[in-house]
Image (cartoon, rainbow, N blue to C red):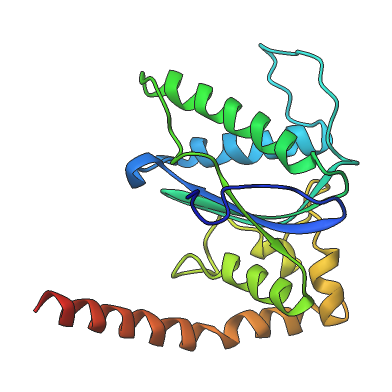
Amino acid sequence: MPARNTVKEFVEQSYYHVYNRGVEKRIIFLDEQDYTVFLGLLKKYLIGGNHNKNNRHAFTPLTSAVSLLSYCLMPNHFHLLLYQYEATGITQLMRRVNTGYVMYFNEKYNREGRLFQGTYKAAQINADAYLHHISRYIHLNPDDYLHWPYSSLPYYAGEREAAWLNTAPILDLFENNRATYMEFVAEYVDTRNELAVLKHQLASKVDE
């Protein structure tokens, strides 16, 4: 049986939570440049920016096919919240970004072979309540989530702006009130920490 969320029959006009990690849970972002390159590839293929001067191959930006709503890059995995207008939008974006990043990473670190743990996972989101939760879940991945430099949370807080990130669908659910959204995210911190402690305690009992 295929793993959950690996069989992707994408539907147009739909939201998806897309995520993946390094093969064997290895680190896929080792320094600031690695994070910057991955985000640069997203920008490049979403709106046509950040062209590599050494490789100006022609391509059509996916502006009308897919939109990025939120993201978080962690050392060994990433999360993206995407909305696709066309049924192949996400497939096109992830193929381009993953291929470009693996080529960059392997050349930089003098390695060969796969970098990611199989095909990326994708879960369709078909309810506003779930959309609320996923955006919050993505932004709360880092422990120090308010100061993590590789997530879209600063854009939701109004600290930064970018043409390649579309915060409107999420913020509209909060009547475009950034403070309310930030409170919504903060409300779950205690619950997240309690769940982490419980998970650790349960794991300890299993090992006894």
Determine the residue positioned at 77% across, 59% down: 15
Q: Which percent across, then down, holds residue 69?
A: 75, 58
Q: Is residue 5 left or right of residue 127?
A: left
Please tell me which residue lies in front, 75 or 123: 123
What is the residue that sits farthest to the left in this orientation? Answer: 208
**In the image, 138: left or right of 117?**
right
Vertical relation: 7 (above or below) 36: below
Place of residue 25 in the rendered image (x, y in percent of width and height, measured from the top left): 35, 47
- Using the image, determine if residue 39 lies above or below residue 142: above
Residue found 79% across the figure and 39% down from its top: 88
Q: Which residue in the rendered view is the most extreme toward the right?
A: 64
Check the picture and name the quadrant holding the C terminus: bottom left
The answer to whether residue 182 is left or right of residue 173 is: left
Q: Position of residue 70 (x, y in %)?
A: 69, 59
Q: Residue 19's spot in the image, x, y percent? A: 56, 52
Rendered view: 70 above or below 1: below
Tag count in the figure? 0
> Taking 99 as reference, is 193 left or right?
left
Q: Could you say which quadrant of the image residue 133 lies in?
A: bottom right
Residue at position x 79%, y 70% in the image: 170
Choose top left, top right, bottom left or bottom right for residue 196.
bottom left
